[in-house]
């Protein structure tokens, strides 16, 4: 239960299956902070090695897309959906770095807006999160 006495959970969607798990506004800090730190490392790689790790870039963009959906809808989407072809183009290295950066900055702005408008609680329901993780672990070993 959240502090309001109601349970707030996200639905994890992978292909056609869905699982409910606890979520909160902390998702913003977690996703956004990780992506920002990884892009700083990617930029250092470009300066030191002259090479971009395109697959990693693609996954960071996917994280931003997933975070936006989580904050907007309470659903953690792990499939690429309508962005699949664009993401695969990034992975293949056929998209200019400047275009990727433009999209990334747009996504960060959209993520900031989603955070301002989200109905997720400030903190997760830790008991519900633990229960979810225990159920997930048990289902993985049986």
Image (cartoon, rainbow, N blue to C red):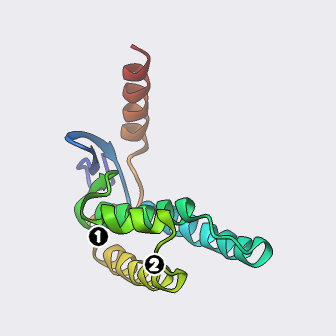
Q: Residue drawn at (39%, 78%), measured in percent from left and top?
A: 107
Residue drawn where x is 43% and y is 43% of the image:
126
Q: Is residue 25 visible?
A: no
- Relative placement, left or right, of 7 versus 109 is left
Q: Which residue is mark 2?
A: 104
| Quadrant in which residue 36 is drawn | bottom right
State the CA–CA distance, disc 2 to disc 1.
20 Å
For the residue pair 86 and 14, the one nearer the viewer reads as: 86
The residue nearer to you, when weighing 105 against 82, is 82
Residue 42 image point, x, y percent: 65, 70
Q: Quadrant of residue 129?
A: top left
Q: Residue furthest right?
A: 48
Q: Is residue 114 above or below residue 122?
A: below
Q: Position of residue 19 (x, y in %)?
A: 26, 39
Q: Residue at x 40, y 52 (%)?
A: 124
Which secondary structure, mark 2? helix
Mark 1 surroundings within 10 Å by alpha-carbon count, few (fewer than 14), some (14 through 19), many (20 or more) = some
Residue 118 badge = 1
User: Which one is earlier in the sequence, the residue at label 2 or at label 1?
Assistant: 2
């Amino acid at each position: 239960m959240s502090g309001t006495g109601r349970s707030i959970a996200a639905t994890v969607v992978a292909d056609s299956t869905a699982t409910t798990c606890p979520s909160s506004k902390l998702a913003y800090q977690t996703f956004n902070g990780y992506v920002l730190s990884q892009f700083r490392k990617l930029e250092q790689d470009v300066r030191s090695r002259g090479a971009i790790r395109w697959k990693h870039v693609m996954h960071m963009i996917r994280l931003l897309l997933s975070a936006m959906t989580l904050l907007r809808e309470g659903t953690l989407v792990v499939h690429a959906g309508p962005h699949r072809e664009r993401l695969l183009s990034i992975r293949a290295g056929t998209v200019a770095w400047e275009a990727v950066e433009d999209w990334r900055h747009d996504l960060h702005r959209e993520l900031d807006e989603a955070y301002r408008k989200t109905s997720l609680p400030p903190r997760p329901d830790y008991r519900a999160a633990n229960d979810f993780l225990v159920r997930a672990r048990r289902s993985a070993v049986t």
